[in-house]
Image (spheres, rainbow, N blue to C red):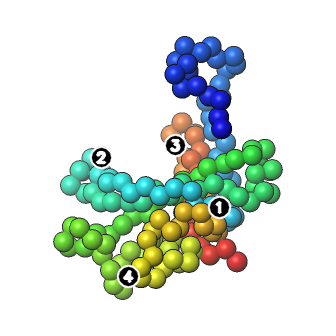
Amino acid sequence: MSMFDPDNFINAEVNSELDTKSIPAPEGDYAIKIVKLKARAWAKKDDPTINGVAIDVTCEVVDQNILSDIGLEKLIVMGSIPLEIAEDGKSLAEGKGRNVALGRFREACDINRPGMPNSSAIGCIVLGRVGHDILEDGTIIAKVRRFAKLA
C-alpha cells in the first residue's frame, strides 16, 4: 500500500526539479495489457454538430524488451475506438461493416461473441500497434492504432 498522503501533498516541499516531457512508447507492434476502458462523448471543436462516442483504452506495455530499451519499469499507452451508434441513438450499430474497430478489439481479446461484455477485455494481453502523433511543439504522443491477437 502506498504511503503517499494526499492531504499533505499541497504543502509538501518538492525536493527536485520534475521532468516536463514524458517518454513515449516506441512505434511498433508489441504486447500490451488492457487495464482500463472508459466510454466518452466527443464533439468536433469547430463544428459541435459532428459528434459521437468512443472508448478510451488504457494499456500497459508488458513487453520486457521494450521496457528495458527505454529504461522504464512501467509504461502506459492509450488507444481509442470510435463507436457507431444505431439510428435509435441508444444502442450500438450492428451488422456488416459496422463497428469494425470495436469488433477487431473484441476479437483480439477473444470476447467477440454474444453475451460477453466489453469489460471482459480488462486484463487481456494483446498485440498493440503503436504509432506516434507529433504535436506542433515537437512533443511525441504514442497511441495504440490497432489491437490484434497475440500470436
Rendered-image quadrant of the N terminus: top right
Q: Residue under label 1, please give it.
A: 32
- Kindly report the distance in space between the C-alpha atoms of the residues bearing marks 2 and 1: 31 Å
- Kindly report the distance in space between the C-alpha atoms of the residues bearing marks 2 and 4: 27 Å
Asked whether the beta carbons under mark 2 and mark 4 sit within 8 Å of each other, the answer is no
Q: Residue under label 2, please give it.
A: 45
63 w.r.t. 120: above or below: above
Q: At x 62% / y 13%, what residue is drawn?
A: 13
Name the residue type under label 2. Answer: Lys
- Counting other residues with Cα less than 10 Å from the Cα at mark 4, is it few (<14), some (14-19), or many (20 or more)? few
Q: Earlier in the sequence, mark 3 or mark 2?
A: 2
- Kindly report the distance in space between the C-alpha atoms of the residues bearing marks 4 and 3: 32 Å
- Counting other residues with Cα less than 10 Å from the Cα at mark 2, is it few (<14), some (14-19), or many (20 or more)? few
Please give left or right for residue 72 compared with residue 81 in the image.
Answer: right
8 w.r.t. 127: above or below: above
- The image position of residue 125, as x and y in percent, is 64, 66
Q: Residue under label 3, please give it.
A: 135
Instruction: Out of 142 and 74, give the one closest to the viewer.
Output: 74
Name the residue type under label 4. Answer: Gly
Observer-side mark, 4 or 3, equals 4
Instruction: Out of 3 and 113, give the one closest to the viewer.
Output: 3
Observer-side mark, 2 or 1, equals 1
